[in-house]
Image (cartoon, helix red, strand yellow):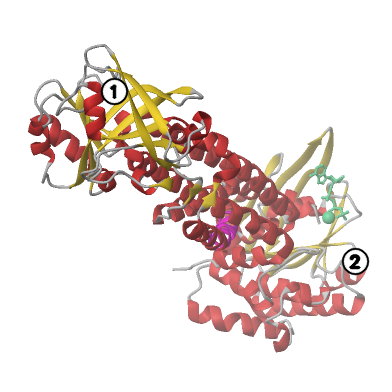
Amino acid sequence: MRRLPLFKIARRNVWRNKRRTAITVAALASAAGFIVWFSAFGEGFGEKTAEDIVRSGLGHVVVEPAGFEKNPQVEKFLRSPREVERLVEGRPRVQAWSPRVEMRGLASSPENSMGAVIYGVDPRREPRISILPRRLAEGEFFREGEERGVILGYKMAEVLGVELGDMVGVMVQNVDGEVAAEAYELVGLLRMGNPAFDNGAVLLPLSQTQHLLGYEEGYNKIVILAESRADVETIRDGLAAEVPPGVDVLAWFEVSPQAFQYYGIMVGLLIFILLLLIVLASFGMTNTILMSVLERVNEFGVMAALGLRPFQVFRVILYEATVLSALGIAVGLLGGGLASWINTVYGADLGAWSGSVGVMGFIDPVVPFVMRPAHFVLGAVTVFFIATVSAIYPGVKAARLRPVVAMRRV
Amino acid sequence: MDKVVEIQNLHKVYRDGFDVHALRGVDLDIARGDFMTIAGPSGSGKTTLLNILGGLDRPTEGRVFIEGQEVTAMSRSELADLRRRRLGFVFQSFNLIPVLTARENVEFALILRGVEPNRRRELPQKVLGQVGLDECMRERRPFDLSGGQQQRVAVARAIVGEPAVVLADEPTANLDTENALALLDLMERLNEERQATFIFSTHDPRVMERAKRHVMLRDGEVVSDERRA
Ligand SMILES: Nc1ncnc2c1ncn2[C@@H]1O[C@H](COP(=O)(O)OP(=O)(O)OP(=O)(O)O)[C@@H](O)[C@H]1O
Ligand SMILES: [Mg+2]
């Protein structure tokens, strides 16, 4: 069988115009590298969004009174939570759980007052399911058995003009529809880096909120932390089948659909950028290859005169693009991989856009990238696709050159 | 006579804004082993005729047969096959594939013909020797060879596969006298040794002197057809 050295010819052709090759390879490498880098960013962004939301107290799975999510009224609470607790305790793939009370209310100082979200947290269990206890700028978290004091978001404390040791008033509507108010000593300042908490969170010991709202033993949420995010659906579905009527079991992304939306936006953005990249790069590269074909009309004339079939001439152009894309992919994956790796270690500080990042529920503005083999595959496949598609038109053009026309350009 | 090429009433009209009647009814029979020049003033249709003979272009009217096969009725890929198997070309310039060395250029023609690997390694060296290309030149790329050397490689490539017909369009036009004569000697010798049919176009009186047969074109018509003893 004869094997024409078409690939050899293509490979050598690539080296003929070193400048053009360098520019083309650099462009393809940038595309591949950017895809790798941006995918790792997107992945990290998604992970972080999810993890931050989960770890700031939302949990992976939440058990709560039916309809509480849509309409969190004070009358909706788990009256006899022991039954549900028994279902959760010791359940496979459940890492930890904690009861919670969440209610809107008012916080006030002698100087000022403002709306707040009041969290009643279990001093013993809360540290296992959220990072709130570890995010105190000042003071200390509640101690077990000593259920006193209040913790405020640090900005809220500023607005109220209170310091540690000052008294803070908390006012809610209780289960009987009456206004209930109590004063607590400020024992800690919460600093999450997320405005929702820093500007509006009031933390009280669970027992204090139960007392304030008139819930007795009841509360309105069980927050469950799964061993991993992959277990979320299993736990949710398992629990949902067992809980008594009137109780909802929700996954984190159902409780906080905006987190999921951000994830969707991120994926959408990635696809958009990819398409844009493909279109732009393909145009640029088609142009470059076409130029190189038109410069070599004579050569293709010679090849045709030697008896190369049009498809064989086409393959030379296609192989040239393949060689270029292979070089671009190699350089790009290496560069993009290295850049992403640096970002997996140091993270990307989105502090510059912190205005919008805050809205996303980030605990801090540093996003650590997450690298996956799939990102490299995506980068390589995309660039290979760009190069191949770009070779088609110039290749057909070269193959269609009638030898006599080609030879006349001598 | 063993006819290798048969040309019947060939017309070519280029429609390029206005019509150019480049060939006006050419009839020629060419015998195997002939060594023939086609001469004529510029624009007389020499290149047009060679292109149509080689299946590089199609006539407006008329028929061409090579070894009994009608070239003018062939498809693109049949033409490619014909060129690969039965024809050799030498052009005025830009004959070689620039990224292949002299030897690889010759070998390329053999691969195209499906010659087996062993012979593919030996033959190019032998033929490049016959055309007088020094061994040290054979691994150079065309860019690093002189015009005369390039033409020799082109001739080597054209004849290495033992084609029925070698078509050469002004192969000496870019060469000085010394090189032109050397190339002619070479082609003459190959014509005798291998019985390959050579058809080439030229303006060059030095070339015309050497041919066994000498056809003159003017305005797309054969005005004389002489045979030398
Ligand atoms: N592709 C083309 N389109 C239009 N006209 C053409 C084309 N090729 C050749 N011609 C015209 O046809 C005529 C014959 O051209 P041809 O190239 O065959 O002449 P030639 O004898 O080879 O000339 P020269 O000695 O200059 O090479 C000329 O008038 C030329 O201008
Ligand atoms: Mg000519």
The amino acid pointed to by label 2 is Asp
Q: Position of residue A201 (x, y in %)?
A: 40, 32
Q: Position of residue A216 (x, y in %)?
A: 16, 26
Pick out the residue farthest to the bottom: B135
Q: How many marks?
A: 2
Looking at the picture, does residue B182 appear above or below residue A195? below
Could you tell me which residue is drawn at 44 percent across and 32 percent down? Answer: A196
Question: Left of B120 or right of it: where is A373?
Answer: left
The amino acid pointed to by label 1 is Glu
- Within the magenta stretch, is there residue B203? no
Please give the chain letter of the residue carrying mark 1. A
**Ligand 1 lies under 8 Å from the Cβ of mark 2:** no
Could you tell me which residue is drawn at 89 percent across and 80 percent down? Answer: B178
Looking at the picture, does residue A211 appear above or below residue A326? above
Can the viewer see residue A220? no
Question: Left of A131 or right of it: where is B166?
Answer: right
The label shown at residue A69 is 1
Can the viewer see residue A318? yes
In the picture of the structure, the residue carrying the numbered disc 2 is: B204
Q: Estimate the spatial distance between the alpha carbons at disc 1 and disc 2, rounded to whole Å.
A: 97 Å
Classify the position of the N terminus of chain A by image quarter. Answer: bottom left
Q: Position of residue B228 (x, y in %)?
A: 82, 70
Question: Left of A54 or right of it: where is A145?
Answer: left
Q: For this rendering, which residue is in front, B109 or A81?
A: A81
Pick out the residue farthest to the top: A177
Per the rendered image, the range of residues in magenta is: A316-330
Confirm or deny contact between disc 1 and disc 2 (CB under 8 A).
no
Marks 1, 2 in one chain? no
Query: What type of secondary structure mainly makes up the magenta span?
Result: helix
State the SS at label 1.
loop
